[in-house]
Amino acid sequence: MSLLSPVEGWYSKKVSKDEKMWIAISFALCVILFVWMVLWHVFGNQNPSNTTYRTSPAEYIKLYEAYVKKNSRGNDNGIPVVMPEPNSDVIMLAQMWRWSPVLILKKDEWYNIHLSSADLLHGFSLQPVNMNFMVFPGYDYVLRFRPNAVGEYKVLCNEFCGIGHHTMIGKIVVIENEADLEKYGYTKDKLSAPNTATAVTDTTTAATTGEMAEAEMVKAGEQLYALKGCNACHKLDGTNQLAPSFKGLWNTTAKVKENGQEKEMLIDEAYVQSSILTPQKHITVGFEQTIMPTMPVTEDEIKQLTAFIKSQKN
Ligand SMILES: [Cu+2]
């Protein structure tokens, strides 16, 4: 019931001329906007691509790892750097909390950039041009992409994805020719030729872990640490912001919570293995705010990662 009742018999009264005019104008506007919507879609040239594939985080991570192992040319702050061929498929992964790899693209060339998430919903936000796309786990979204201006672009995450969300900043560098690389800090010693990168080599086929010397294991572990994104949370310099630093971690005791009970555990092979395979089983006290994701790792990879953690002395 309204505060004031309408005048008796209002319903059968004739509609006034003014009112008819407004109804006509708004109706015409609706029709124009409706048609506009369709025309904009066809001629606007502002549509995201509609190429998508169904995938799963595990499957996509596998694709990403194979891609980076094959194409990595070094690393930039621990993130693999790839300089894809024009018109090729580029595999980019969003994960807690980084974008990988760093891309170096050529101006005015087309690329098919695949985007998917390893864990939860992230948002791809290319700055400063402000292009935004959602990145879902299980959904491979292909952006057909042609950069038209040189420069260094940042990829921010614009979907809140946890305590390290603000650190999730990726990079895309657009160059005109190879000579531009130095301008962006990619000197010759920093970027190797494809397939010979020291940043990531394929250790899975090179030798089985059993045959590898300790030093090789450490090296392989270091590469996995960068490839898989452990470095997004675990630092090597003793800072413990998002997760325990690997520095001096080996052979110390961790205070953990298991089934609500606090206890102390020695950080050894078994402990590292269960930390990676079942991160939620025992939670290190002080890091309850961060959730370590469960990532696909093979037995050999665990051994290599363990060797790497072991090598991080105080
Ligand atoms: Cu995110």
Image: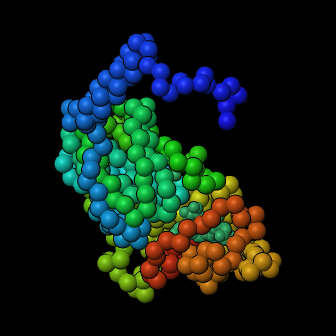
Is residue 46 toward the left or the right of residue 245 in the image? left
- Going by the picture, which residue comes out furthest to the top? 18
Residue 50: percent from left, percent from top? 27, 50
> 273 above or below 99?
below
* Residue 73 image offset from top left, x and y in percent: 33, 54
Q: Which percent across, then down, holds residue 254?
A: 74, 74
Q: Is residue 292 left or right of residue 27?
A: right
Q: How is the image coloured?
A: rainbow
- Quarter of the picture holding the C terminus: bottom right
Rendered residue at 55%/68% (across/down): 293
Question: Which of the two residues, 74 or 24, is positioned nearer the viewer here?
Answer: 24
Above or below for 179 versus 104: above
Residue at 44 percent of width and 14 percent of height = 16
- Tell me: 7 left or right of 199: right
Q: Residue furthest right?
A: 262
Residue at image position (75%, 75%) is 256
- Which sits in the foreground, 116 or 227? 116
- Position of residue 295 relative to residue 258, above or below, is above
Percent coordinates x, y for residue 142 in the rendering: 29, 52
Residue 123 appears in the figure: yes
Q: Residue furthest bottom?
A: 210
Q: Classify residue 281 by image quadrant.
A: bottom right
Residue 197, visible in the rendered structure: no
Which residue is nearer to you in this view: 281 or 254? Answer: 281
Q: Quadrant of the N terminus?
A: top right
